Image (cartoon, rainbow, N blue to C red):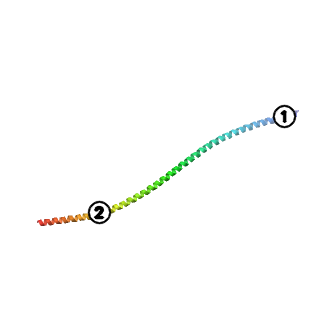
Amino acid sequence: MDKLREELERVQGAAGKFQIAHQKTQIELNKFHQEIDILREKMERNQGESRRVQGDKEKLLYELDGIQAELEKCNMVSSRLENEKDDACADIDQSRDKYNKLQVQNQSHSSEGALSSLEEALNDRDKQMNQLREQR
């Protein structure tokens, strides 16, 4: 019987150790489950943040496309205005050339007119001198 008692005590001791080990394992398992839950919550928050960032990214890309389209329009308008400026400058240069030519022609006509007027004045003077001579 002593042997049975010793065996029973040994089995009870082993069962006690097993119970303690089981409780420790259960505590560790509960800690792991808590850590898993915490990590799962973090992951879900990160996924939500990732979706928000992705949405922001898509919105910014859409806005960038709009800005690029506006920039292309501005470049086309700028190019058209530059061409119109060049055309206007060319028109101004042509007008200046025509004006200068007209001025030269007008000056030569004015010179001819002045010369004619001078000749007439000289003729009139000669006539007056002749009249004065005759009157003397």
Amino acid on which the number 2 mark rests in the picture:
Gln
What's under tag 1, amino acid-wise? Leu
- The residues bearing labels 1 and 2 have C-alpha atoms spaced at a distance of 143 Å
Circle 1 is placed at which residue position? Answer: 8
Disc 2 is placed on an element classified as helix
51 on left or right of 81: right
The percent position of residue 6, horizontal first and vertical second, equals 85, 34
Disc 2 target residue: 107
Q: Which mark is residue 105?
A: none
Crowd around label 1: few <14 · some 14–19 · many ≥20 (10 Å): few
Please tell me in which quadrant of the rendered image residue 24 appears.
Answer: top right
Tag 1 secondary structure: helix
Q: Residue at x 29, y 63 (%)?
A: 107
- Residue 102 location in percent, x, y? 32, 62
Quadrant of the drawing holding the C terminus: bottom left
Query: Which one is earlier in the sequence, the residue at label 1 or at label 2?
Result: 1
Tally the numbered discs. 2
Q: x%, y% of residue 48?
A: 61, 43
